[in-house]
Image: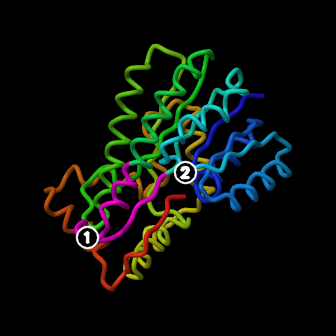
Amino acid sequence: MSYALVTGAAKGIGKAIAAELAERNYKLLLIDLDENSLDKTAEELSAKYQVHVHTLHQDVSAPDALQNIFTFTTPYHDQLSVVVNNAGYGINGAFEQLSLDEQLNIIDVNVKAQVKLSYTYIPILRQFPKAYLLNLASTTAYQTVPYLNIYAATKAFALSFTRGLRYELRNSGISVSALSPGSTDTDFVNRARMGQHTRRIADRFNMTAEQVAKIAVNGLFSGKAEILPGAVNKLNAWLPKFFPKVFVEKIAAGIYEPKEPTGTTFALPS
């Protein structure tokens, strides 16, 4: 059995992807900031799938994160053939009304950590005849999204970065894919401090994390460049190409513009 590394693995899509990989007999290296949830997930997956699960409680945006993660995974490098950069989060609200620090931290988690881990683990993945790298993007990567501005911009980066990386590695044994989920029934809306108006719209189109993960892992192992789970998400990625940008921006703003006070409590990534 090979090992798979998954960041942001305690809950939601990350946990569901870890479960899909465990079902395929991958041993797991799981990383998350939420230590309690991570431990519960590890115990659950180990018992259900009878695979080895190792965990690291780590904020991927911390200055020492890369060194800590590399040290954690080093004993398993000769078996590590799958890397999933899932960690990420966003904050809903107008750019100037959110703190600069928390918006910069979104970039640290969604962009810098993804780049650092990709750079670090590509040499490890090269040792295998076939290996896989999955980076998390989003349907927000395909358009401008006012009031979810920094998050959407980081996901546009993730999509572009992943496609470019895929091309550069086309002659290697590493298959690189971007996963672009849309509304998913996870804790994302709570961490993002989304208002009831946005939540009601999201609830109409929610997929489960398990549905997204199954499509994601199937797509990853099929060698897809972009994985868009579900017909609605495919439509959301495709339609903006055919309308004026200002029209698309207005529609997105109508969904994400806060209709009630959301507060400014700092939200740690998880």
| Front-most of residues 237 and 231 | 237
Q: Is residue 13 left or right of residue 235?
A: right
Q: Is residue 171 left or right of residue 49?
A: left
Q: Is residue 264 left or right of residue 37?
A: left
| Front-most of residues 38 and 248 | 38
Q: Eyeballing the image, is 119 above or below 53?
A: above
Amino acid under disc 1: Ala
Q: Nearer the viewer, mark 1 or mark 2?
A: 2
Q: Eyeballing the image, is 233 above or below 92?
A: above
The x, y position of residue 252, in whole percent, is 27, 66
| Front-most of residues 2 and 175 | 2
- Tell me if mark 2 has few (under 14), some (14-19) or many (20+) residues whose alpha carbon lies within 10 angstroms of its own: many
Residue found 63% across the figure and 17% down from its top = 128
Quarter of the N terminus within the rendering: top right
Residue found 30% across the figure and 61% down from its top = 100
The x, y position of residue 241, in whole percent, is 22, 49
Residue found 31% across the figure and 78% down from its top = 258
Secondary structure under the numbered disc 2 in the rendered image: loop
Q: Eyeballing the image, is 206 above or below 163?
A: below
Residue found 35% across the figure and 35% down from its top = 161
Q: Which residue is tagged 2?
A: 59
Question: Based on the displayed image, in which of its 4 quarters is residue 198 positioned?
Answer: bottom left
Distance between the Cα atoms at labels 1 and 2? 25 Å
Amino acid under disc 2: Asp
The dot on residue 94 is: 1
- Tell me if mark 1 has few (under 14), some (14-19) or many (20+) residues whose alpha carbon lies within 10 angstroms of its own: some
Precedes in sequence: disc 1 or disc 2: 2
| Front-most of residues 24 and 6 | 6
- The magenta region covers 88-107
